[in-house]
Amino acid sequence: MLHQVAQFMARRVWYAWLLRVTICSAGTLLIGPLSAASLLWFFPTGDPDALRQMQGWLIAAIVVSSIVAMVLTYYFVRLCFRYLDQRDPSELRMDINARMPVMLLSGCIVSANVLAVIFLFQLALGWIEVKSVSDPFNSVFLLSAFTSLVQFASIGFAEEVRYRAYGYASGEGSVPLPVLVVANAVIYALLHAQYNQFGIIALVNLTVIAGFYIAALHFFNSIWFGVGFHFAWDFTQVSVFGLAFSGTGNTSLIVIEQTGPPVLVGGTALIEAGLVYLVVFAAATSLIVYLLRQRSAAPTMV
């Protein structure tokens, strides 16, 4: 492996790979804000009363801009792969086909159940105190939940397409697998450095989480399980269990007070800064890697 890495560095292929990833990432990172700005520029942001009167239109603009951003991101990444990499976009593993809704739903279900188990585990240990439970049919909560659902769907989609679909596929075949996995994972982890709770545990954990998404990408040969998992992970922790706060003012179904040790449970800005989540994702990644090896070692039926 070391010899392979040395050859790769000597050829300086990583320059070209990093340049392609930088161009694609920069483009996709701009799509979201530009989509939102194009639809929100006419709202009177300096007048709270006027904004309240236009709340319905504001929510509609947020939803439309998020959907537009996802569509533009999808096709921008395909164009980058076609013209920057000179390769067939089908290699991105993000084709829209009959498997897509199944993979999305599977990722959502697995993610929500993992977080539910973690929530119940902390509750049993007395690390969580439930303050109140919101009325799920209250119009304020429903609007908040719907808005965050669309926003988190857009964020989860963009990050998986940007870093796993393109960032990973762009290096396949030219970058040694160990280098590609580690570099992709570390880049993804470092992009969360703006959070207050970001530290060595968060860095290691987010790197492991990126490895989990890459392993899932290989196992399912599709980006869609990771997209569903990522979206549901963000939405469930913020809008259902109240484990994290997104900073957007969204209401959580369960309002809690987190009393567990921060080193174990993380913080409201970044729950992934807790060792509990590191153990969970390390175990999940190890399981997928084990299943991948078992599948590759199985004899092929002729």
Image (cartoon, rainbow, N blue to C red):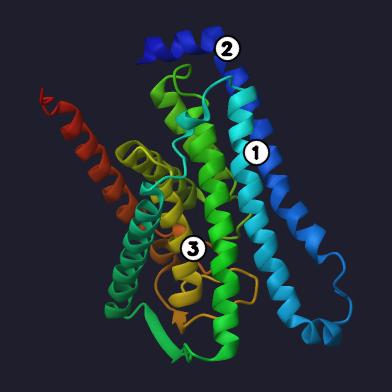
Name the residue type under label 2: Arg
Above or below, 1 against 26 in this view is above
Q: Residue at the spot x=85%, y=84% of the render? A: 50
User: Between marks 1 and 3, how big is the CA–CA gap?
Assistant: 24 Å
State the separation of the CA atoms marked 1 and 2: 26 Å
Please name which of the two marks, 1 or 3, marks the residue nearer to the observer: 1
Which secondary structure, mark 1?
helix
Mark drawn on residue 76: 1
Q: Is residue 166 left or right of residue 120?
A: right
x and y percentages locating residue 290 in the rendered image: 21, 38
Residue 282 placed where, x, y %?
A: 31, 48
In depth, the one of 286 and 293 nearer the eye is 293
| Residue at (85, 64) in percent of width and height | 41
Is the Cβ of the residue at disc 2 closer than 8 Å to that at disc 3? no
Secondary structure beneath dot 2 equals loop
Pointer 2 residue: 12
Residue 275 in percent (x, y) is at 37, 57
Up/down of 79 relative to 207, above or below: above
